[in-house]
Amino acid sequence: MLITTDAGRIERARQMGLLQPVSSAVLAKAVPAHLRDPDNNWFGFSKRARVILFNKEKLTAATAPQNYEDLADPKWKGKILIRSSGHIYNQSLVGSLIAAIGVEKTEAWAKGMAANLARPSRGGDTDQIKGVAAGEAELCVSNTYYYVNLMRSKKPEDREIAAKVGIVFPNQSNRGTHVNISGGAVAKYAPNKEAALKFLEYLVSPPAQKYFAEGNSEFPVVAGVPLSAELASLGAFKEDQLNARVYAQNNAEALKIMDRAGWK
Ligand SMILES: [Fe+2]
């Protein structure tokens, strides 16, 4: 089996011929269509949204940018933190922008956003959140679980960081927020294919979905599964329904665009 995060990675495995399609009514019913490969080579079992987080002393949910597109507005010059373009989370996000607005507009957007960075990209999403909480920038882009993990941390200093930061789910008045997956697949030469498929089907059962929400602070893909108080506190949001394979396949193009835009 292969279990990994980000549709970009699991789609790469499919392209390399490492996976095999499976036919499962259970998976087809449980996993929303946009979170699985249309040819049934891989399936999402939990999901994360890539959101805008802001410093509550400087911005509110109303004054913060409302769309990914807004991050290129010169009004945010020197105020944004985001990890490097080399990271697959950004390649998938930009892959979704390519699908939504096309290559040309995405490149102009990437140039604008790269020009707005408070400092050259470094570190992971948690480092960007810490920078925002410390006032080094007004806002950042991060996956939801990093924020929720800080809220749920045993360390009081982590919880203080989370308390200084608010959240905007981008693009709520249009296509919805970019969501990505933690996914699973059956390997091409799996010696125990039936058992592997049974395990994938187990992963959409309510107890397993609850493990995801509690273990990795991601959203379960199956609706109605109980969430931790911290995860539930983020509230409901509209998801971009673009199929994960589409933005995954746009990853290479996305990286070229970000390179040309000067986003390191
Ligand atoms: Fe991560």
Image: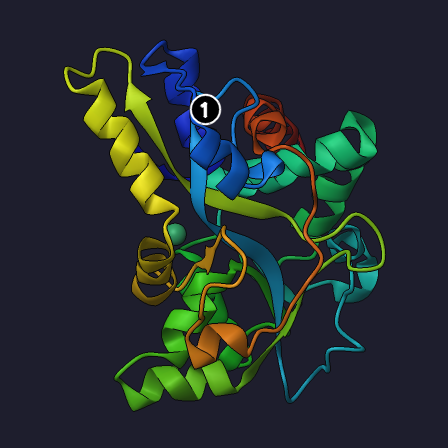
* Left or right relative to 228: residue 110: right
Q: Would you call the spot at circle 1 few (<14 residues within 10 Å), some (14-19), or many (20 or more)?
A: many
Q: Is residue 20 something one can see in this rendering?
A: yes
* Left or right relative to 139: residue 223: left
Quadrant placement of the N terminus: top left
* Local SS, label 1: helix
Q: How many marks?
A: 1
Residue 13, quarter of picture:
top left
| Percent of width and height locating residue 233 | 55, 79
Ligand 1 is within 8 Å of the C-beta of the residue at disc 1: no
Instruction: Check the image and report above or below for 191 versus 2.
Output: above
Q: Nearer the viewer, residue 117 or 206?
A: 206
Residue 55, quarter of picture:
bottom right
Residue 80, quarter of picture:
bottom right
- Measuring 64% from the left and 38% from the top, which residue is drawn there? 94
Q: Which residue bears the numbered disc 1?
A: 11
- Measuring 41% from the left and 75% from the top, which residue is drawn there? 228
Q: Residue furthest left?
A: 191
For badge 1, the amino acid type reads: Glu
- Measuring 31% from the left and 90% from the top, which residue is drawn there? 156
Q: Residue furthest front?
A: 25
